[in-house]
Amino acid sequence: QVQLVESGGGLVQAGNSLRLSCTASGRFAETYALGWFRQTPGKEREYIAAISWIGGTEYYPDSLRGRFTISRDNSDDSKTMVYLQMNSLQSEDTAVYYCAAGSFSREQLWGQYWGQGTQVTVSS
């Protein structure tokens, strides 16, 4: 059973940075990718970034390339850590951020497993 647990959310001032963490444990396919989505009330969940579990190849949608960086650490056999470094945060980045694991195709991550989400609030 795959389990994803996010941490690192909170309140941050506009212009500052924040790093989110996701602890991924359990068995999932080696072809899977891990990544991040975000969602605000009344809007669809938005894909932010993904990284392959094997190889660590990073993927970003063109609309968000530049301010966000994804990385992972799978040196511990019992878990994989996935990070989302967010720089120059703006009020429109306020959302619940979700960690996800699943297949990657058609230039985006298709989440099969999800974390519970962590709130990020950017104050202006």
Image (cartoon, grey):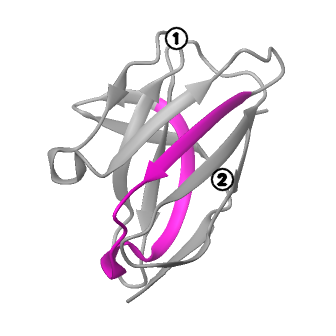
Amino acid bearing label 1:
Ile
Q: In the image, is 111 to the left or to the right of 115? A: left
Please state which of the two labelled residues, at mark 1 or mark 2, is closer to the viewer.
Answer: 1
On the image, the x and y values in percent for residue 103 come to 44, 28
User: Is residue 30 shown above or below 103?
Assistant: above
Answer with left or right where residue 86 lies relative to residue 1: left
Q: Amino acid at mark 2?
A: Gly
Residue range (magenta): 80-102
Q: Looking at the picture, how far across and down is residue 7, in whole percent? A: 70, 57
Residue under the point 57% across and 12% down:
30
Residue sitting at 72 percent across and 14 percent down? 75
Query: What is the CA distance from the residue labelled 1 to the residue labelled 2?
Result: 20 Å
Provide the secondary structure element on which disc 1 rests: loop
Mark 1 = which residue? 54
Q: Earlier in the sequence, mark 1 or mark 2?
A: 1
Residue 113 coordinates in the image, percent (x, y): 61, 42
- Give the residue at x 44% y 28%: 51
Q: Farthest right residue?
A: 78
46 or 121, which is in the foreground? 121
Q: Which mark is residue 74?
A: none
Q: Does the magenta stretch mainly form a helix, a strand or a loop?
A: strand
Task: Determine which residue is flagged by label 2.
Answer: 115
Q: Nearer the viewer, residue 122 or 61?
A: 122
Q: Was residue 67 drawn as part of the magenta stretch in this picture?
A: no
